[in-house]
Amino acid sequence: MPTLKSWDLKILVTLNAYFAKHSSFNKILAEYLIYFLPVILIVVWFWSKESKKLALRGLFSIILAWPIFSTIIGKLVNRPRPFEVSGVQELLFHRPDYSFPSDHAAALFALAFSFWFSGAKKLALGVFAYALVISFFRVATGIHWPSDILAGIVIGLIAAYTIDLFDKPLNIVYNFILKIAHFLRLA
């Protein structure tokens, strides 16, 4: 593990030192860009009749990745954030809660992998790029260690794969939600 810790610290310190001096977009890219995630789901939902299930699968993958898997692992590991222990500059205010794994990376990559497994490859590639930008700046601003992001990617993959694995039984839930949405004239 000493190699992973030194790798984490080396990457973090290099990125943090650079972006402390050279980026005025840190807050937008590391903190605010995540709020575009619901917009993606809403656009996919209303894109076509067939895309509604794609949006639901993505949403279920996010829920499994972030508030379930990531939260449980975070409470078990309870790793402090880099700005608390490494001497890097805190470029954005963040409450000092657990760092590992990255909730943002888990949610974003869960959505990207969900789209990929559903066959929406071009959309998935766009979400992968979106996820990488946010994840990169979460490290650069001292909020996450690089290994937190890697763990988030793995959690996102596992969550999306789990939802894909249970696609047939979840069709009952999807159809129920779609009936409610039709009744409310949202589908």
Image: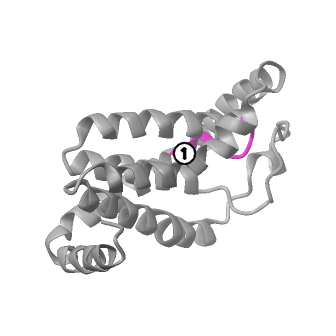
Residue 45 shown left or right of residue 72 in the figure: left
Where residue 61 sits in the image (x, y, percent)?
A: 37, 62
Where residue 3 sits in the image (x, y, percent)?
A: 58, 37
Magenta span includes 146:
yes
Span highlighted in magenta in the image: 141-149
Residue 74 shown left or right of residue 124 in the figure: right
Residue shown at 36% from the left, 76% from the top: 184
Where residue 107 sits in the image (x, y, percent)?
A: 48, 55
- 130 and 51: which is toward the camera: 51
Which residue is the site of mark 1?
Answer: 149
Give the tally of numbered discs. Answer: 1
Q: Residues within 10 Å of mark 1 (few under 14, many from 20)?
A: many
Residue shown at 43% from the left, 61% from the top: 62
Residue 180 shown left or right of residue 102 in the figure: left
- 156 and 51: which is toward the camera: 51
Residue 5 visible to the viewer:
no
Residue shown at 75% from the left, 46% from the top: 82
Residue 71 visible to the viewer:
yes
The residue type indicated by label 1 comes to: Ile
Outermost residue, front side: 185
Q: Quadrant of residue 22?
A: top right
Magenta span includes 9:
no
In this rendering, is residue 43 above or below 160? above
Instruction: Report the quarter where the C terminus lies.
Output: bottom left
Residue 129 shown left or right of residue 67 in the figure: left
In this rendering, is residue 11 above or below 147? above
In this rendering, is residue 130 above or below 71? above
Where residue 120 sits in the image (x, y, percent)?
A: 23, 43
Give the structural element (helix, strand or loop) at label 1. Answer: helix
Residue shown at 45% from the left, 68% from the top: 63
Judging from the image, the colouring scheme is one colour
